[in-house]
Amino acid sequence: MVGVTGGYSLYRNASTEWLSIDAVDADGNLRDSSLGGNQYPITGTYDEATSALTFRAGGIDGRGEGNLFVSHYTGYPILDGDGNITVLAGTYTEFVIKLNPFGYVSELGGWYAIPGME
């Protein structure tokens, strides 16, 4: 089976962030992993039997607007002919609570992450 540990450039909705998956424990839990160059710790799992990857990030956005967000990602690795990861890809849902003016926004879209392109 394929391991997903490593660093990736994650692309979604006209933005790019660094995704770091430093370790996956024996139960498939992501350990010491983050999104946005260590700005947002992530929690999630990698199922080696199905290759399914799920993770979540959340916090206060980095744009200075003070918005609270949580993002949920699901996806799978896409392999080349030698069994190496060429890209991770899937869908995400993001929920944002805007503080000024107060409001709520949700977004659904696709994402992909290319290994080692920081």
Image (cartoon, helix red, strand yellow):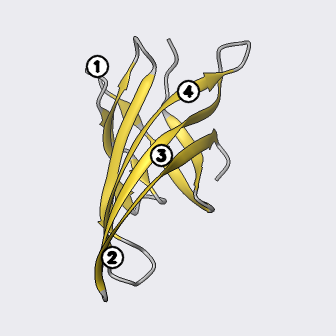
| Gap between marks 1 and 4 measured at Cα | 19 Å
Return the x and y of residue 118 as percentages of the image width and height: 64, 53
Tell me the amino acid under the disc marked 1.
Answer: Ala
Q: Earlier in the sequence, mark 3 or mark 1?
A: 3
Label 1 Cα crowd, 10 Å radius (few <14 / some 14-19 / many 20+): few
Residue at the disc numbered 1:
26
Residue farthest along the right direction in this orientation: 81
Label 3 Cα crowd, 10 Å radius (few <14 / some 14-19 / many 20+): many
Rendering quarter of residue 113: top right
Q: Earlier in the sequence, mark 2 or mark 4?
A: 2
Query: Which residue is depicted at the point 63% across and 62% down?
Result: 14
Q: Nearer the viewer, mark 2 or mark 4?
A: 2
Label 4 Cα crowd, 10 Å radius (few <14 / some 14-19 / many 20+): many
Tell me the amino acid under the disc marked 2.
Answer: Asn
Residue at the disc numbered 3:
20
Label 2 Cα crowd, 10 Å radius (few <14 / some 14-19 / many 20+): some
Horizontal side of residue 25 vs 16, given as left or right: left
Residue at the disc numbered 2:
67
Q: Give the answer, above or below, for where 108 lies relative to 62.
A: above
Return the x and y of residue 69 as percentages of the image width and height: 32, 65
Q: Are marks 1 and 2 in contact (CB under 8 Å)?
A: no
Q: Give the answer, above or below, for where 84 lies relative to 96.
A: above
Query: Which residue is depicted at the point 31% across and 24% down?
Result: 28
Horizontal side of residue 51 vs 17, given as left or right: left
Q: Nearer the viewer, mark 1 or mark 4?
A: 4
